[in-house]
């Protein structure tokens, strides 16, 4: 499971937790660097290359959301980011995805799970995962760059909607139930049904409305599919 020559930045102001995570990852073959606040994290990311960032939300000065936003929007880094939060709330999770996080973990967490998620994100970033590109008909999803295209058209989606599309394309042509979608996207803190319905509406509007062939299908009372018509 280990990835050779992978360097991780841990951004965590709780010294004991940072040391514990760092020791575990170093024992697994990772190189680890540390920042105890947001400003230091931004400076380190400007000066060094990291294969992934483990980013706590509650930081002195700049919080994790601000740091993630600056890494994505100002520094234009596509380094995988796992956000850590002690609050199991839907707002934290949604905010994290919206500012560009790739994954999140709720404290307290198992170190083995953090390691497994880091490995998966880094492999995806390097294009090492089998099926790093998803395709259904002329709809393509590059998991390395997170770029979605249909034909020659680039499709822009919000982070949450991207996450939903990735699940539907990954499972294609199988059906995905509403309950499973909500669980994979939001965990145990699923929002009301209107939230998922809104994201699905926006997804359909972007991947289907401008095109002749419909790829997204609703199976009433059961779930959703992204597939070719012959696979319904």
Image: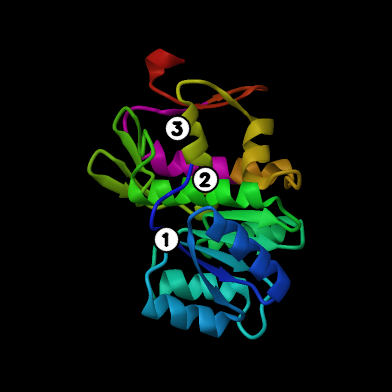
Give the residue drawn at x 37%, y 69%: 49
Separation of marks 1 and 3 at Cα, in angstroms: 26 Å
**Secondary structure beneath label 1:** loop
User: What is the spatial separation of the Cα atoms under label 1 and label 2, in whole angstroms?
Assistant: 21 Å
Coloured how?
rainbow
Residue that numbered label 2 is attached to:
163
Residue 23 percent location from the top left of the image: 61, 63
Q: Residue at x 65, y 57 (%)?
A: 93
Left or right, 229 with reference to 12: left
Q: Which residue is mark 3?
A: 169
| Sequence-first tag of 1 and 3 | 1
Circle 2/circle 3 CB separation < 8 Å? no
User: Residue 171, position in %: x, y?
Assistant: 49, 27
Give the crowd class for mark 1: few <14, some 14-19, many >=20 residues within 10 Å.
Answer: many
Question: Could you tell me residue 112's position as x and y percent?
Answer: 63, 47
Q: Position of residue 213 (x, y in %)?
A: 34, 27
112 within the magenta span: no
Name the residue: 55% across, 40% down. Answer: 200
Q: Which secondary structure, mark 2?
A: helix
Q: Secondary structure at mark 3?
A: helix
Asked whether residue 194 appears in the rendered view, the answer is yes
Quarter-of-image position of residue 79: bottom left
Number of other residues with Cα within 10 Å of mark 3, as a class: few under 14, some 14 to 19, many 20 or more? many
Viewer-side residue, 181 vs 4: 4
Q: Name the front one of labels 1 and 3.
A: 1
Seen in the picture, residue 182 relative to 80 is either above or below; the reply is above
Task: State which tag comes first along the sequence, 1 or 2.
Answer: 1
Q: Is residue 203 magenta?
A: yes
User: What residue do we see at 70% from left, 44% from top?
Assistant: 187
Provide the residue span drawn in magenta.
Answer: 199-217
Question: Callout 2 environment at 10 Å: few (<14), some (14 to 19), or many (20+)?
Answer: some
């Amino acid at each position: 499971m280990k990835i050779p020559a992978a360097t991780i930045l841990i951004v965590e102001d709780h010294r004991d937790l940072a040391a514990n995570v760092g020791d575990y990852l170093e024992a697994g073959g990772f190189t680890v660097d540390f920042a105890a606040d947001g400003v230091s994290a931004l400076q380190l990311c400007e000066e060094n290359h990291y294969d992934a960032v483990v980013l706590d939300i509650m930081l002195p000065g700049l919080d994790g959301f601000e740091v993630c936003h600056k890494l994505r929007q100002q520094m234009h880094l596509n380094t995988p980011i796992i956000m850590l939060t002690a609050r199991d709330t839907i707002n934290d999770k949604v905010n994290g995805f919206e500012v560009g996080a790739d994954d999140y973990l709720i404290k307290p967490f198992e170190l083995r799970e953090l390691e497994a998620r880091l490995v998966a994100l880094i492999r995806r970033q390097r294009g090492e995962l089998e099926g790093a590109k998803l395709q259904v008909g002329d709809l393509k999803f590059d998991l390395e760059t997170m770029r979605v295209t249909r034909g020659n058209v680039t499709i822009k989606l919000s982070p949450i909607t991207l996450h939903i599309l990735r699940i539907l394309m990954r499972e294609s042509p199988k059906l995905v139930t509403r309950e499973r979608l909500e669980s994979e996207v939001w965990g145990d803190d699923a929002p009301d049904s209107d939230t998922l319905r809104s994201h699905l509406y926006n997804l359909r509007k972007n991947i289907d409305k401008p095109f002749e062939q419909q790829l997204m299908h609703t199976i009433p009372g059961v779930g959703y599919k992204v597939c070719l018509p012959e696979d319904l």
